[in-house]
Image (cartoon, rainbow, N blue to C red):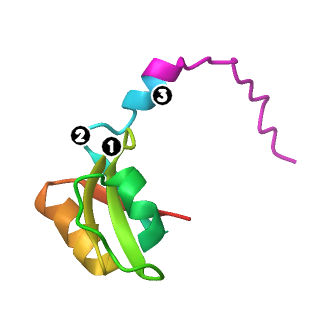
Amino acid sequence: MTDLGTTTHDNVRVTPEALAHLGEGHIAYVKQIRSEDVPGLFPQAPQIAPGLKLFALHSADGTPIMLTDSREAAVANAWSQELQAVSVH
């Protein structure tokens, strides 16, 4: 029998401010949204017909970067800005 030892974990508290900066400048996320959600996320965007499936690219802190009609375009934009793109649901 192999003794794997005992693993302990200290409780580490992360402040909301520190959490907001995790991945900053390195990670972006792609999220599928509805066209009805666009005005709240991208107030400068032109009016878009309701019922469309779109994709938003956000920085790690949630700041909207771009809006597109394809996930591939959002990921390509992240790569062009040297950001690692991850998907959220």
Q: Is residue 34 visible?
A: no
The quarter holding residue 71 reads bottom left
Q: Calculate the distance from the C-alpha at mark 1 to the C-alpha at mark 2.
A: 12 Å
- Position of 30 relative to 21 (above/below): below
Disc ID at residue 63? 1
Q: Earlier in the sequence, mark 1 or mark 2?
A: 2
Looking at marks 2 and 3 on the same chain, the residue that comes earlier in the sequence is marked by 3
Q: CA distance from mark 2 to mark 3?
A: 14 Å
What residue does disc 3 label? 19
Query: Looking at the picture, which amino acid does disc 1 mark?
Result: Thr
Q: What span is in magenta? A: 1-17
Helix, strand or loop: magenta stretch: loop
Q: Which image quarter: residue 26?
A: top left
Q: CA distance from mark 1 to mark 3?
A: 14 Å
Q: Dot 1 lies on which element? A: loop
Q: Amino acid at mark 2?
A: Gly
Q: Looking at the image, which residue is at 61% across and 17% down? A: 13
Residue 25 image point, x, y percent: 23, 40
Crowdedness of circle 3 by 10 Å Cα count: few (<14), some, many (20+)?
A: few
- Relative image position of residue 50 (x, y in whole percent): 44, 79
